[in-house]
Image (cartoon, rainbow, N blue to C red):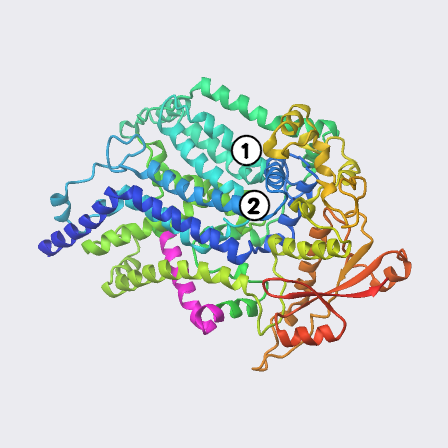
Amino acid sequence: MEGKNNKILQNVDKIFEKIEKNHKLILLVIIALGFTIRLYAVLVGFGSNHYSKIDELEAYEWANQLRYYGHPRFFTYIPGFYLTVIANLLLLSSGSVRWFYFFWVLLGTFTVYLFYWLTNKLFANRSSSKNPGSNLPDFKEENDSISYPENNDIINDIKYPETFALLVALIYAIFPWPVKYSVSYWNPHFIIPLVTLMLGYLYDVLTVRNSKKITGLILTIAFMPSFHMIIIYALPVIAILLFIRSRFFLNFLNKISKNKKSLRYDFTPLKINFKYLLIGLFLSILIWIPFLYCDYQNDFFILKSYLKGGVSSSFKPETLKIFVNPILITTNEISRFTGHFFFEYQNFLKKAYGRWFLGFIPVLASIILSIMAFIYGYSFFNIKKLFEKKIDSLNYLLTYLVGCLFFHVLSMQVHEDRYTIIFFPISFILLAYFIYSFLISFSLNCNIFKKFRIKKLKKALTDDKLRLFILVIIVLVMVSSFYITFVHFTYERNPNYKNVVRLIPSLIYYEDIKKIIINDYLKEQEISAVDKRVYHTISKERINGLNIKNHSLYNIYPINKLATKSKLFFDERKNINDYFLFTNRDSYQKPDQQFGKNLGDIWILDNPDTKYYFSFDYIISQKAENGETTFLSRDPNREKQILNCIERFINTNTGFVISSKQNIDEYLQKKDKNIKVYELKFIPPDQGVLKQELKNGYIYIGKLSNAILLKKIVSR
């Protein structure tokens, strides 16, 4: 048996040593894979996201008004740095929302590297006494360790830290939840790279005396409220970790245990670098000045509204989702992203696997694997390790996670899956830790469940057949996760079921519809659209009409001066207000007009003489060939909701669309006689249907990814 173990270990060592040696190249491949799958998700999935129906659209509307607010409270006001990023992306990209998603693809890809960076920082040389963050014994030499295959030391120490860090990065690069969170510019998602950095900086502060990383720790904490207030659940945990590693607490521990020599504590207390602490505080104040200035100009209406907010005093069962969601995000269970109803999830699984019930096999496998990973990870949690000489990396992460869970439950707030962002990296590190440990133990015929106290459970988990079953699950989950990620976005790109039009919740999709309508209008006006900014004009009149004193970051004089002189933002425009005009309007002329005729004072987009409204005629109950009700007709309310979002998107900086909530007959009776009104209608991309609609008086105006858009005049 010993000889067999020696041979297996040697083969495993050779593979892992090659990985360690070529870790930079492998990391580059993983990052490229993460970038490719995220770019695919945007290009093929149009950045499709259920958040586009509410949060992303609202952020787009606010950013078009160049508003700036801080975010010291939940739900009420979109955060300042979040909107500033979006507003600048609008300016840099001539207003195209595609840049929102491409920017996030880059940021999401960078986060793949950050997961590798964090794991490597915490677990590199974890078994070495040279590591200031380790309290584990030195890893034994290869020949010594083989003599006791039942010993857990060989498994629980990280002998191949680069391999482990690469596994974490790979999981984050290809699993469906991380990828979905990387193709949306929803404000909570910005927290993920920040919290990953924060966990690394906090670890440095706890383990390195006079660490300069205290500046990074403070800055990441200061930035987070600008995107989401979830940091409030982590702040007490951070404070507690810093306190229990302080000299004051060390003296307190030794004082209460002075009569018990075996309980003497001798860890080196942390020492704060006050120079870099002050630098971090100073920079954090600078970050918050725009928000404080803005709120001061408006009588502190945001801070006052936050202070008025109450705290929940009644327990809700949904609060307990906090214990499920950290596991859920590491699985293939993505019903949340396929719709509100089970039949939608069935349709997705049917497309992915041919038979919907077959799709539950990899889903169930991923749930089993994630549960086992968390059970295995938590088996190492020990609060006493926090008082030992050196901080154990895994215990550090588990302490942070447990603390966040505790304070969330204490608040009795309903937990949503987005709240996992405050400990997002930890869930994936725990999953990778289990897979890494199991693969090592499987090759050595070791028992990673030896420390479990429940004998029946330990016996069951050490059965050879069960261990082989777990290995199959790991392979199945890794392959199916990569597959399901691709299939999900392909499904979003092709959402039609039996050629019935389904609207896509995506700002890119909304923008394509807007371009079709504006092109149709300009064609009617015999205006040649030379400057693509015509599609994204920001209305000066709308901004001046806001009743908030200092609604824009760009109204702050130094930033205004910097921006207006920057060719990067405004090319060669002399004044920032020029951007709010119908840009380069002398390029939009009828052929018979003299060149140079200035149309700058004619707000043709805000006050057009042509109006459009969307018809719901395409939402008709139909039967597919197999007799089943079609996808669309079973959820017309959601289609109406998305249609309302399309109207809001188009009217953010134009006045083209009559709201579907308005009674069209009443509007036609009261409208200005000089205004023409067109009905817009979506039809399936079917030539037979198109010919029939053209005979009915409709006019073709444009084609979308999954539909044809027609118009028909209903009034002159």
Horizontal arrangement in the rendering, residue 615 relative to residue 159 (left or right): right
Give above or below for 620 relative to 535: below
Residue at (76% x, 47% y) in the render = 589
Q: Position of residue 66 (x, y in %)?
A: 68, 37
Residue 3 visible to the viewer = yes
What is the quadrant of residue 111 in the picture?
Answer: top left
Q: Secondary structure at mark 1?
A: helix
Give above or below for 543 relative to 605: above
Q: Say which of 76 and 107 sits in front.
A: 107
Question: Which disc is residue 99 wearing?
Answer: 2
Query: Does the magenta portion include 359?
Result: yes
Q: Quadrant of the C terminus?
A: bottom right
Q: Position of residue 99 (x, y in %)?
A: 56, 45
Residue at (50% x, 37% y) in the render = 234
Front position among marks 2 and 1: 2
Q: Residues within 10 Å of mark 2 (few under 14, many from 20)?
A: some
Disc 2 to disc 1, C-alpha distance? 22 Å
| Three-letter code for the amino acid on which mark 1 is drawn | Phe
Horizontal arrangement in the rendering, residue 103 relative to residue 120 (left or right): right
Horizontal arrangement in the rendering, residue 669 relative to residue 574 (left or right): right
Of label 2 and label 1, which has the lower sequence position? 2
Residue 185 visible to the viewer = no
Magenta stretch, main secondary structure class: helix
Q: From which residue to which does the magenta span run?
A: 350-374
Q: Residue furthest top?
A: 275
Q: Which residue is mark 1?
A: 223
Q: Say which of 460 and 483 sits in front.
A: 483
Q: Position of residue 94 (x, y in %)?
A: 63, 42
Q: Say which of 23 and 594 sits in front.
A: 594
